[in-house]
Image (spheres, rainbow, N blue to C red):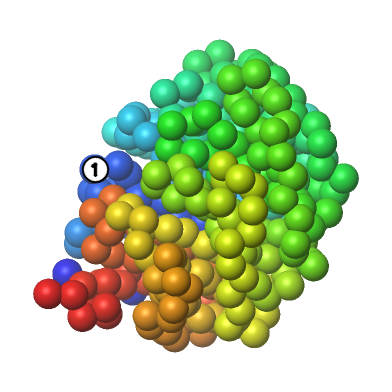
Amino acid sequence: MENLTLSGHADGVKSVAVSPDGKILISASEDGKIKVWNFKTGDCLLTLGGHPFGVKNVAVSPDGEFFATGGGDGTIKIWSLKNGKLLRTLITGYSRLDSGFMPVAIVPNAKTIISHSSSYSQTVRLWDVETGQLKGTLTGHAGSVKTFSISPKGDILASDGADNSIRLWKLQNEELIGTLEGHTGGVLTLTVSPDGETLVSGGKDETIRIWQIRTQKLLRTLSGHSYAVNSVKISPNGHILASGGYDSLIKLRELGTGDLLNLLSGHSGAVNTVTFSPDGKTLVSGSEDKSIKLWNLDEILNYH
């Protein structure tokens, strides 16, 4: 496919997600809107409202049945991916958040959504998708929780926060199994590799850190972004690491070595979010410049 730029949001794009079948792209924006796009053509299929103080995050369920959005109004909304119908609203306990973070994550095969309870909250909350009831609470951070990543099997949760640390949890019994320290500024983004072996973190200290989950050891520290690292993601084949930064740049690296493969400089504002298509052939980015870009990785990386 050709590189595409999708326009339509009236404010910065905070989060993007692609459906498991690769047909649908969903974007969340500070303008309070959620847009549903045809991934192949770039046509906007639906525009949804419901978060009056901006949409901070979006996540698609692994089965492709629904997606969840987290808003500045302190709610999590669950939507049908098939028709965009609002299925349920989860009230986290706060009428409005005081920061730009409302992380959401969906646990594979467990019908569970992960969130926090407020922008200053040091706890992680587990919600039942079908009932909307609170299932559990994880405590342990000494600073506000900013985001999460879940292992593909759904057994391990990584959470990060303003205390510069990362916590690892076993979800089955809600047990804290480790704390990773090394960042010298708040951690803003996490991603677990498809094989569940590696965790990548990025943050305000302008670094990306690669950790082995089993041993909880730091494998590598990468630099190169001139400001905060807002988003990191690993390709479905586990080979490529993409990072988006406040410096408006996207960097593509070999995960195993950390070697820089390419630098993408098409955005004119901070890159808030990056993700890969399920087939790994396209990278999607969302920016403060209000745009979404779809990058053809076959072309960019000269794969044949």
Q: Kindly state the secondary structure of the residue where label 1 is placed.
A: loop
Indicate the quadrant containing the C terminus: top left, top right, bottom left or bottom right.
bottom left
Q: Quadrant of residue 213?
A: top right
Indicate the quadrant containing the N terminus: top left, top right, bottom left or bottom right.
bottom left
At x 50%, y 69%, the residue is 243
Residue 205, image x, y percentages: 73, 72
User: Is residue 249 or residue 224 the one in the foreground?
Assistant: 224
Q: Quadrant of residue 164?
A: bottom right
Q: Which residue is the site of mark 1?
A: 21
User: Is residue 277 or residue 172 the one in the foreground?
Assistant: 172
**In the image, 259: left or right of 131?**
left
* Residue with the most extreme right position: 142
At x 56%, y 14%, the residue is 131
Residue 188, image x, y percentages: 67, 59
Amino acid beneath label 1: Asp
Is residue 86 visible in the rendered image? The answer is no
Q: Is residue 258 above or below residue 181?
A: below
Residue 257, image x, y percentages: 44, 71
User: Is residue 138 or residue 8 the one in the foreground?
Assistant: 138
Q: Quadrant of residue 44?
A: bottom left
**In the image, 82: left or right of 217?**
left
At x 44%, y 50%, the residue is 193
**In the image, 86: left or right of 131?**
left
At x 47%, y 21%, the residue is 110
Residue 100, image x, y percentages: 71, 57
* Residue with the most extreme left position: 304
Q: How many marks?
A: 1
**In the image, 234: left or right of 185?**
left
Q: Residues within 10 Å of mark 1 (few under 14, many from 20)?
A: few
Is residue 128 visible in the rendered image? The answer is yes
User: Is residue 256 or residue 283 the one in the foreground?
Assistant: 256
